[in-house]
Image (tube, rainbow, N blue to C red):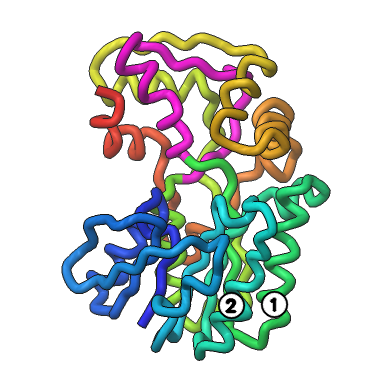
Amino acid sequence: MIVVTGATGNVGRPLTRALAEAGRQVTAVSRHAAAMPDGVRHVAADLAEPAGLEPALAGAKALFLLLSGGLHAAGADPADVIRQAAAGGVRRVVLLSSQGVATRPFGPTRIALRAVEDVLRESGLDWAILRPGGFASNALWWAESVRAQGVVAAPFGDVGVPIIDPADIAEVAAACLLDHRHTGGVYELTGPERITPRQQAEAIAAALGSPVRFHELTRDEAKAAMAQSMPVELAEDTLDILGSPNPAELRVSPDVQRILGRAPRPFADWAARSVSAFR
């Protein structure tokens, strides 16, 4: 049995499907009930309250751990999930961490993620750590404005970083869960090339077959919008990377190619698959 947390998200959903199609028993965990592939068991649980995971972890041998909001919940200790998994008989954990743990190690979010990584390394379990950069699916932030006004509004319009398709993260996660050759690996996951917000808007327009105008926000405007859905310190960290990426954040990593035997998907592929969100 493999447990997938964050199973309704941009990484967890394709990962759950891939594992089910590979013939594995899967327990999908999310906060709310959701439709799942045939044969997949669903358990509603909140990672901010690890005790609620006990039904999901029963009989499990592997865990995909995506912390998301559970990392930031007041009083939460995400490392408790790892400890509980180990106590319950899980032998392998694949952790979705962040590129920023290595590239910007002193931000509050990165310090917290590093602590979770350290607990996993010292747990005695088999493990792999995935450190993706920015997600292509972050472009869904623009979906409403594209539908309503044909506009993408974002800061730093001509600053590009090699963002990663969540479907590629899911495929890498599946490989790490199923193949013991990846045990002990720390993998930096990026897309195949740098792409700017302005270029992302062009790719969305091409997928739609209709014009999309780019409007550049100031940093303050972007922070105000982001702070409505994430902690302010995380918004600041994100804007630092988007506005002034350092050399490590500009680097195209070879790790997707190494694990999957193919190049990572370009943003245009994600836009074409996700075009219905922008119509």
Amino acid under disc 2 = Trp
Residue at image point 62% right, 52% down? 73
Q: Nearer the viewer, residue 232 or 217?
A: 232
User: In which quadrant of the rendered image does the C terminus lie?
Assistant: top left
Q: Nearer the viewer, residue 92 or 32?
A: 32
- Determine crowd level at label 2: few under 14, some 14-19, many 20+ residues with C-alpha closer than 10 A: many
Q: Which residue is mark 1?
A: 121
Q: Which residue is mark 2?
A: 127
Specify whether residue 178 is in view.
no
**Element carrying mark 1:** helix
Location of residue 213 in the rendering, given as x and y in whole percent from the top left corner: 41, 9
Q: Which residues are magenta?
A: 136-164
Location of residue 94 in the rendering, given as x and y in whole percent from the top left corner: 53, 71
Residue 243 highlighted magenta (yes or no) = no
The total of numbered circles placed on residues is 2
Amino acid under disc 1 = Arg
Tag 1 and tag 2, C-beta contact below 8 Å: yes
Residue 147 highlighted magenta (yes or no) = yes
Location of residue 155 in the rendering, given as x and y in whole percent from the top left corner: 60, 18
Relative to residue 208, is residue 105 depicted above or below? below
Asked where in the image residue 42 lies, by quadrant, the reply is: bottom left
Q: Which of the two discs, 1 and 2, labels the residue nearer the N terminus?
A: 1
**Element carrying mark 2:** strand
Relative to residue 195, is residue 52 depicted above or below? below
Residue at image point 26% right, 13% down? 210
